Image: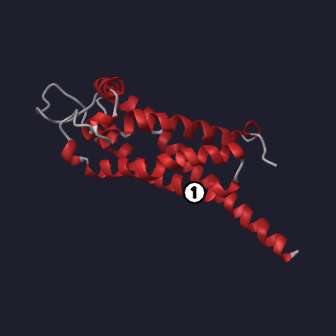
Amino acid sequence: MARPLTSRPTDLVYFIYFVTHVAASLIIDLQPMLPNTLVPTVIRNLPIGYVKMSNDPLIGGAMGILDNKDQLVWFRTFLGLEMLFQLPLFILGARALWKDHRSIYIWLLIYGASTATTTLPCLTTIIYIPTSSPNQPVGTVAISEEQRLLLLASYLPYFLLPLYMTWDMASRITKQISAGKSKKKA
């Protein structure tokens, strides 16, 4: 019998993360991958406001709002991975966690490792992008220290939670294997 999600606090955090990430992916992250005709104008304008506030070099560049689009082929590749692998897994993962299906653990391990790996270069970009200054050359993408802190605060959880999920799922799978071996010996 499935244990209720509320009795599994870590799974509840993962469930909430996946459900909210579906919306974030569709509203912000995946817009550069979709034709404008598929995105309602009100939703299409959300990333523009976000980039004006944060000067996010990744989303702004991928969407062509900032002047660094050609430098971000790697990021657009990661967005493709998010669209084709992660987004379906958000839905499958949330459903499996809701129903306490432990067979999802291997997929969550793969998701966690993949996402932590692809988010790390995003964090590194934010850390090392130039700080804006009055003498900044035209066309150079730079951010203020306040914007850097805002971006780190918004990207860091999307690195730390998948990194923890990787460790957690590896531990759970190891326990399942050990339990299976013990039953086989008995």
Residue 49 placement (x, y as % from top left): 31, 23
The one nearer the camera, 160 or 38, is 38
In the rendered view, tell whether residue 112 sits above or below residue 180: above
* The C terminus, quarter of image: bottom right
Direction from residue 118 to residue 63 in the image, left or right: left
Q: Residue drawn at (26%, 37%), measured in percent from left and top?
A: 63
Query: Which image quadrant is residue 32 in?
Result: top left
Q: Residue at x 16, y 36 (%)?
A: 140
Q: Position of residue 52 (x, y in %)?
A: 28, 24
Secondary structure at numbered mark 1: helix
Assess disc 1: are there few (<14), some (14-19) or many (≥20) residues with their C-alpha within 10 Å of its C-alpha. some
The residue that label 1 is drawn on is: 107
- Which residue sits at x=48%, y=41%? 158
**In the depicted structure, whether residue 50 falls above or below residue 117:** above
- Type of amino acid under label 1: Trp
Task: Name the one closer to the observer, 133 or 63.
Answer: 63
